[in-house]
Amino acid sequence: MFGVPRMKPLAVFLTLLASSLAVPKDLTGQMFIFPSLSDTAYIQLTPTSNEILFNVTVCLRFFSDETKQQGLFSLATATEPHSLALALNPEGGYQLYVAGQLATFLALPYERNQWNSICATWDSSVGLTQLWVNGVASPKKALHAGGSIADTPIIVVGQDQDSYGGTFNTADAFVGHITDVHMWDHRLSPCEIQSYAGNLLFRPGNYLNWKALEFTKHNYVVVEYNSSARDK
């Protein structure tokens, strides 16, 4: 997954160009479907700004019956492809990368063939990160204390970026459904995370907002109405 060549400049330019053509859309009640294993199918998300990030919360819901490693969310910068990445761990639990540093959370639940709600927080000031899955909190772990996530990001779901904007691998590809992707430039409180997990009222992400999302679809990904995600 790591140590591979970076994406060629022309490919990065084309990726950024495609992103610039995206139009905000309210995806309430819809989902991204990744129906087959692929190293070319993904969704690229356009953030509302390119601000330097010192605190982060990312939340999404996913539905899959796979047990292999799967990239759920990947934010890359030109200096670090794993600036912020969230993945299912093949031995169980989850992996979170911040600025290339890894924390593994083995005890959190993953319900196969059911919707799972996951949120990840990172606070630069104390260097602590935490995951919440279906309302269950992990222990806090240390990642990138005093650092930041800077530079122009490329954000994708359904794949893991091993270079800036690409170098995807089927070993890390996601197969299943993803919905309700939100990202904030601050750390949500436990109460706010519980509201997201329970499908209660919550303030949408101010960095990525599922209700006003700019995105571009690449290759075989289907955007479809979702009748079951609200059951979780």
Image (tube, rainbow, N blue to C red):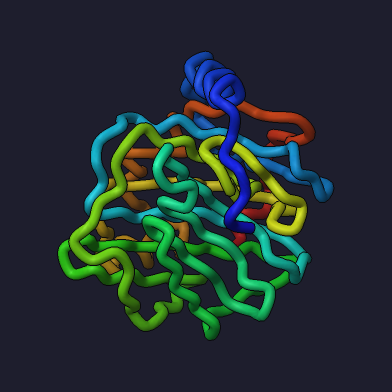
Question: For this view, does 124 lie left or right of residue 32?
Answer: left
At 30% across and 62% down in the image, what residue appears?
A: 122
Which sits in the foreground, 148 or 190? 148
In the image, farthest residue toward the right: 36
Q: Is residue 150 above or below residue 201?
A: above
- Tell me the quarter of the image containing the C terminus: bottom right
Residue 138 visible in the shown view: yes
Left or right? Give the position of 57 relative to 167: left
**Can you say whether 111 is above or below 231 in the image?**
below
The picture places residue 13, in percent across and down from the top left corner, at 53, 20
Residue at figure coordinates x 75%, y 66% from the top left: 113
Q: Position of residue 27 (x, y in %)?
A: 54, 34
Q: Quadrant of the N terminus?
A: bottom right
Q: Left or right of 145: which side holds 219? A: right
Q: Which quarter of the figure has residue 99? A: bottom left
Question: Horizontal and vertical percent for residue 167?
Answer: 65, 42
Whether residue 22 is visible here, answered yes or no, is no
